[in-house]
């Protein structure tokens, strides 16, 4: 039985390979620097799920911290602070690669699934179609509030989302919140070690920000969805395991029905590396 180690020549549809018997002890004995360079040019999941299983030598290279540091450098995943260095660069790489919105159902496409209604004043929350075309054509719904205060929340379990405790404590990735809104906003974010702890009884339940903002509603009617709020939290210290997010508002002129703020595209992201878009 033979195994193909590398493609030597490609001529049209003819492929020539260098082959050696699989039971040859030198079959997989590729120089370290060459093997690492090969791995750096393969999809990361192939390195972990395929190449790593070939032999002990390949496993050692696939597990080597220098490989994943180099991969991060080549793909632009740079640390926010040199003092916050991950102990597992492979994990850091995949957390950067898999960065995503941790808010479920951010546009209201599934009505209020995954949201907890905290306050449902006036005629309550409602999901409607946008009053004007959204810059993102995929956005076809938004949440709307009424003439009394309406707020809703989500609790994000970071460990369940794949962020290990060691990673959160060592790297303390920036936590980025952004959303599109129309109207007066009430917005809260809590970083928590335990969702059962009372905010008034322990510092572990840490209020990071609470804001109420307003601006020219006439301008918003002319240029809908121009307000894109972004907040970035950092240096929050070790121990964070949950993020509690709550937002809402009300109609400032107290009309019956649903004329309050409109919210859509809400997101919470963990940003382990410097953001390429410079938030």
Image: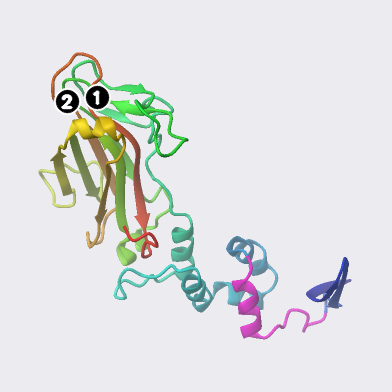
**Contact between labelled residues 1 and 2, with CB atoms less than 8 Å apart:** yes
Number of marks present in the image shown:
2
Q: Is residue 204 left or right of residue 110?
A: left
Residue 188: image x %, image y %? 20, 42
Residue 181: image x %, image y %? 27, 36
Q: Which residues are magenta?
A: 24-42
Residue 241 in view of the camera: no
Helix, strand or loop under label 1: loop
Tell me the colour scheme of the image. Answer: rainbow
Query: Which of 32 and 261 lies nearest the eye of the viewer?
Result: 261
Question: Which residue matches tag 1?
Answer: 145
Give the farthest residue toward the left: 200
Label 2 – label 1 distance at C-alpha: 8 Å
Point 18% across, 26% down: residue: 250
Residue 236 in view of the camera: yes
Circle on res. 118: none
Image quarter of the C terminus: bottom left
Question: Which residue matches tag 2?
Answer: 149
Residue 35 in magenta? Answer: yes
Q: Is residue 210 left or right of residue 165?
A: left
Image quarter of residue 112: top left
Image quarter of residue 11: bottom right
Image quarter of the N terminus: bottom right
């Amino acid at each position: 039985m033979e195994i193909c180690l590398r493609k030597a020549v490609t001529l049209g549809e003819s492929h020539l390979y260098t082959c050696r018997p699989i039971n040859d002890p030198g079959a997989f004995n590729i120089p370290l620097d060459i093997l690492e360079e090969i791995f750096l040019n393969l999809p990361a999941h192939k390195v972990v799920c395929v190449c790593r299983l070939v032999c002990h030598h390949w496993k050692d290279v696939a597990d080597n911290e220098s490989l994943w540091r180099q991969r991060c450098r080549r793909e632009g995943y740079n640390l926010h602070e040199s003092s916050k260095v991950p102990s597992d660069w492979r994990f850091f790489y995949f957390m950067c690669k898999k960065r995503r919105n941790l808010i479920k159902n951010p546009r209201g496409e599934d009505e209020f699934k995954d949201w907890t209604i905290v306050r449902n004043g006036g005629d309550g929350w409602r999901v409607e179609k946008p009053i004007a075309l959204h810059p993102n054509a995929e956005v076809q719904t938004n949440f709307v509030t009424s003439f009394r205060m309406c707020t809703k929340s989500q609790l994000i379990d970071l460990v369940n989302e794949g962020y290990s405790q060691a990673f959160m404590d060592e790297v303390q990735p920036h936590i980025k919140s952004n959303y599109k809104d129309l109207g007066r906003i009430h917005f809260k974010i809590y970083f928590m070690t335990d969702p059962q702890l009372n905010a008034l009884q322990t510092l572990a339940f840490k209020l990071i920000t609470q804001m109420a903002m307003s601006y020219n509603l006439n301008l918003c009617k002319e240029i809908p969805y121009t307000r894109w709020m972004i907040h970035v939290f950092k240096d929050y210290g070790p121990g964070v395991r949950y993020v509690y997010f709550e937002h809402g508002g009300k109609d400032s002129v107290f009309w019956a029905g649903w004329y309050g703020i409109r919210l859509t595209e809400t997101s919470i992201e963990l940003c382990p590396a410097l953001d390429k878009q410079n938030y």
